[in-house]
Image (tube, coloured by chain):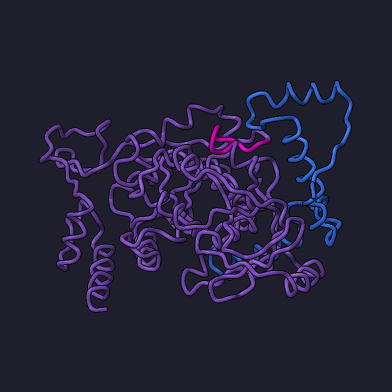
Amino acid sequence: MIAAHGGRLVNRIAEGDQRAELLAKAETAPRLTLNAREVSDLEMIGIGAMSPLDGFMGSYDLGSVVKSCRLANHTVWPMPVTLSNKGVALEEGTDVALVDENDNLLGILHLQEKYSFDKDAEAQGCLGTTDEAHPGVQYLKSIGDEYLAGPVWVLNMPTYDFANEHRLTPRETRVLFKARGWETVVAFQTRNPIHRAHEYLTKCALELVDGLMIHPLVGATKSDDIPAKVRMDCYETLLARYYPDDRTVLAVYPQAMRYAGPREAMFHALIRKNYGCTHIIIGRDHAGVGDYYGTYDAQEIFENFSAEEIGITPMNFEHAFWDKVAGAMASNKTAAATKPEDKVFLSGTKVREMLTNGERPPVEFTRPEVADILIDAMASKATV
Amino acid sequence: MNNKVTLKIPRPLYERIQQVIGDSGFSSPTDFIVFVLRDLVGDRALEKTDPEADVRPSVTNDEIAEIRRKLENLGYL
């Protein structure tokens, strides 16, 4: 089984007597309300998905991540994982109760450091831009100027009203892969419904490994992305009809989207390594938004690091489409079709327009069962 | 009141730390030493309620059995 990033799968879920003692501490500690991304990050740290992180980053780690894509101890780590203060008076060396927006207690932070950081430098270093139209920059501008750092313990897991049967932790997926006898597993990260192009990529990848984990991101996304609940219906329907049950697993990834392009592609990869995956599919403009990143940036960033320090192997794919000449899915690498009119591809805008009008996209683009779920979702949204 | 104190460490060690931090993002040996000590002492302070936190295996056999039961109940196995 592939080792966790940094060598040890972190476990910051408090249990038994330890949990009872920490609960007692949390009762008298000042309370800090986490935003949606911070709740996701706390959960991810707790279950070990963010190994080797055992808490929110301090200034040295953040400075090193921004500057060189590594933690201060030199471990490769591409994205900030920070906690912002919301105007609470807090002292270093004390404990802080972490609560969600409904004041439900989630965890406890031992506050080692309070610090401020140049947000423009953070945005430029990690997102590649300071443009306020970028959702990641908008997030940075929306949070407080003071960051809080230190180790955390999760005392109560966040609760959700969907996909609870698919919320597997890294420990659970590792046991699952072992039980199924999979030595090599490819992860597919997505924040969109799976159309034929991505179905093709996942199946190409599965030809080369023992198992496939469809691992959709279900944390916070942009408001114009398809809601995770709707996407889950699409994935379940698609997998039930069109994927081999004994070679495919559907589990969810409770992370919030950063839209950081290449750096987030690496982030997604290292986290999937913690889930026990040996490979990850990296498509064109992975985790991108708008035109902030080059088409192949998310694939090329891996070349800046040795295979040993990354651990998980990226499987790079070209854009796929239906090739009318060959009568099959293909990419520009494998297509017989040379003319654009022989390649069935629809833009996101066009697909949204068709679905809003209650029209199924061509079967060569998306499975009819998936199209129907999306049409229903669009119709319900329109009537709200 | 100044909330910092001065500690003395052997000069060769200080010079070795200067070499080690090189291009790592630490601006001085002091920054590095504070980082290491915070990591060591701060973390232990919170973990002292669970003295076995550092030595327990990543997943015990009992936990594996429990996870397998959960995966079976969910239809994964």
In the shown orientation, is residue A314 left or right of residue A12? left
Give the x, y percent position of residue A259: 40, 48
Q: Over which residues does the magenta segment extend?
A: A64-72
Give the x, y percent position of residue B44: 82, 52
Colour applied to chain A: purple
Q: Nearer the viewer, residue A350 or A278?
A: A350
Q: Nearer the viewer, residue A248 or A303?
A: A303
Furthest residue in direction front, as rendered: B1
* Residue A326 to residue A369: above or below: above
Please say whether residue A201 is visible from this viewpoint: yes
On the image, which quarter does residue B30 sit in? top right
Query: In what quadrant of the picture does the C terminus of chain A appear?
Result: bottom left
Query: In what quadrant of the picture does the N terminus of chain A appear?
Result: top right
Give the x, y percent position of residue B29: 75, 30
* Residue B12 to residue A251: above or below: above
On the image, which quarter does residue A225 sit in? bottom left
Residue A71 in the magenta stretch? The answer is yes
Q: Residue at x 26, y 32 (%)?
A: A334
In the shown orientation, is residue A108 left or right of residue A364? right
* Residue B22 to residue A265: above or below: above
Colour applied to chain B: blue
Give the x, y percent position of residue A337: 16, 34
Residue A242 in the magenta stretch? The answer is no
Please say whether residue B77 is visible from this viewpoint: no
On the image, which quarter does residue A373 sit in? bottom left
Q: Nearer the viewer, residue A263 or A236?
A: A263
Q: Nearer the viewer, residue A143 or A252?
A: A143
Q: Residue at x 56, y 45 (%)?
A: A117
In the shown orientation, is residue A148 left or right of residue B17? left
